[in-house]
Image (spheres, rainbow, N blue to C red):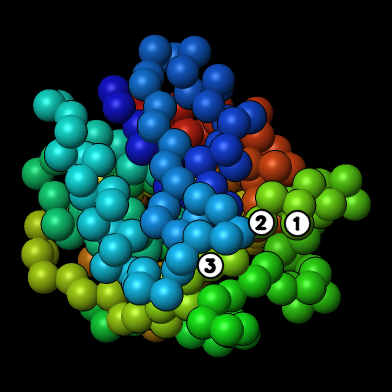
Amino acid sequence: MDIILIPGFWLDASSWNDVVPLIEEQGHRTHPVTLPGLDSVDADRSGIGLREHIDAVVRLVDTFDGPVVLVGHSGGGPIAHGVADRRPDRIARVVYVDAGPLADGQAINDALPVVDGEIPLPAWDEFDDADLVDLDEDLRTMFRSRAVPQPARVAADPIVLVDERRYEVPVTIIASEFPSAALREYLAADAPFTRELARVRDVDYLDVPTGHWPQFTKPVQLGQAIASAIR
C-alpha cells in the first residue's frame, strides 16, 4: 500500500523520519510530503493557501495506480480530509494523528499569530501543557531548529468540501494529546468540532498517549499504530 504522510504546521517531510521504518517494515511504501512553502525558511509563502496544500497532495495521489492511505498530523489532518473529498474513490483510509476532519467552511486555526504574512512557531508558553507532554528540552530545541513558518492562509482559509462520498472513506483516529474515550464523549455530546467526524460511516480509534507531536516523542508507538490502522 502507498502511504502519504502529511506533516502538521511548521514541519516538512523529514518530521516523519523516525516513523517511516515502522510502517515500511510491514511492506508498505511511504511518501512523506513537504507541502508548498515549507521547503525552507526563505521560501516564498505569500501566494499559498489551504487550496494549494490540498492540490499538492491530490497531484501526488494521482501518480499512483492503486488505492492510497493518507496520514495527516495536526494541521495536516484537514488537508487529508480535503484530499478525500476530491478523490474519495482513491483513498483507502485516512489516519488522523492528533487531528480530525473539518466541516465545510471551517478554518484549521485562524487564531495563530501572523507575522509579515506567515506564522512562525510560537513560543512554548503559547501552547497548552497537554501539547508539550514528553517534548523535553532536547526535542524542543530540535523542533525549533527545523521549524519553518507556516503560510498564514493555510491556517485561516475556510476549507471547501463538495463530495459527500468523503464520508464513505474509512477513518482511524490516533489520539495522543487526550484519550480516544474523551473524543467519544465529545461525539456523544454533539460538540461542534466533532460534527464532521460524526458523519463518517466507519471510524476506528487508537491511543498513543503523549503530547501533540508523537512523531517526535513516541515515534515507535506511532509507527506501530499507523501500521495497525492500515491492516
- Give the amino acid type for the residue marked by disc 1 in the picture: Arg
Q: Indicate whether 222 appears above or below 27.
A: below
State the separation of the CA atoms marked 2 and 3. Answer: 9 Å
At 59% from the left and 66% from the top, the residue drawn is 149
At 37% from the left and 63% from the top, the residue drawn is 78
- Give the label on residue 37, or none: none
The percent position of residue 71, horizontal first and vertical second, equals 40, 44
The percent position of residue 208, horizontal first and vertical second, equals 62, 43
Is 189 left, or right, of 49 in this rendering?
A: right
Mark 2 and mark 3 in contact? Answer it, CB < 8 Å: no
Quadrant for residue 19, please give it: top right
State the separation of the CA atoms marked 1 and 3. Answer: 13 Å
Mark 1 and mark 2 in contact? Answer it, CB < 8 Å: yes
State the separation of the CA atoms marked 1 and 2. Answer: 5 Å
Residue assigned mark 1: 144
Residue assigned mark 3: 150
- Give the amino acid type for the residue marked by disc 3 in the picture: Gln
- Give the amino acid type for the residue marked by disc 2 in the picture: Ala
* Residue placed most toward the observer, 185 or 110: 110
Residue assigned mark 2: 147
